[in-house]
Image: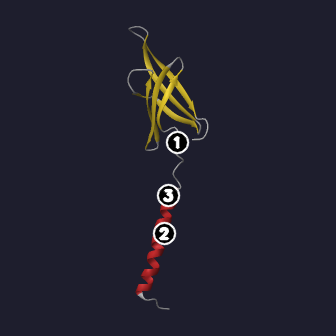
Amino acid sequence: MYLPKNTMKRTLIPIILLLIISSFELNTNTHPVDNPFLGMWGLDIEGGGIGWLHVNEEKGYLDAELLWIGGSVLPVANVYLADENTLVVTRTSNAQKSSERTHVITHTLRITKEGIF
């Protein structure tokens, strides 16, 4: 059976377009669910202080900056998801105990989500 060139073109073009479109749909479904912790957050600190936390993700890695009660916004030492409802943020500071001794103090924040995000 012989098909004219125009018929083959009309048949092949929709098939190719369908394959291209379906490959885009497959790729969009493989992205992970958005992280509800991403964004900027105001923090109520026990004892009456306030703080600010900015959580972002770049190239698949979490990062964060923190303002703790006062001073400057600083990068955190660590930030990760312990599970889908818990974000763990670690900040460090140096405490000079003497001219010869400095301690690194580690503070860990466990932030849990409640309700529906």
Q: Which residue is mark 1?
A: 35
Image point (47%, 23%), residue name: 50
Q: Where is residue 78 shown, x and y percent of the image?
A: 48, 31
Q: How many circles with numbers are drawn on the protein?
A: 3
Judge by depth and name the residue closer to the eye, 103 or 66: 66
**Disc 2 packing (10 Å; few <14; some 14–19; many ≥20):** few
For numbered disc 2, what is the local secondary structure?
Answer: helix
Image point (48%, 29%), residue name: 42
Residue type, numbered disc 3: Asn
Instruction: Spot the residue most to the bottom.
Output: 1
For numbered disc 3, what is the local secondary structure?
Answer: helix
Q: Where is residue 63 shown, x and y percent of the image?
A: 44, 35
User: Would you place residue 80 above or below residue 25 in this image?
Assistant: above
User: Would you place residue 29 above or below residue 1 in this image?
Assistant: above
Say whether disc 2 or disc 3 marks the residue closer to the N-terminus: 2
Q: Which residue is mark 2?
A: 19
**Disc 3 packing (10 Å; few <14; some 14–19; many ≥20):** few
**Disc 1 packing (10 Å; few <14; some 14–19; many ≥20):** some
Q: Which residue is mark 3?
A: 27
Instruction: Spot the residue most to the right.
Output: 115
Judge by depth and name the residue closer to the eye, 37 or 31: 37
Residue type, numbered disc 1: Asn
- Distance from the alpha carbon under mark 1 to that under mark 2: 31 Å
- Distance from the alpha carbon under mark 2 to that under mark 3: 13 Å
Say whether disc 1 or disc 3 marks the residue closer to the N-terminus: 3
For numbered disc 1, what is the local secondary structure?
Answer: loop
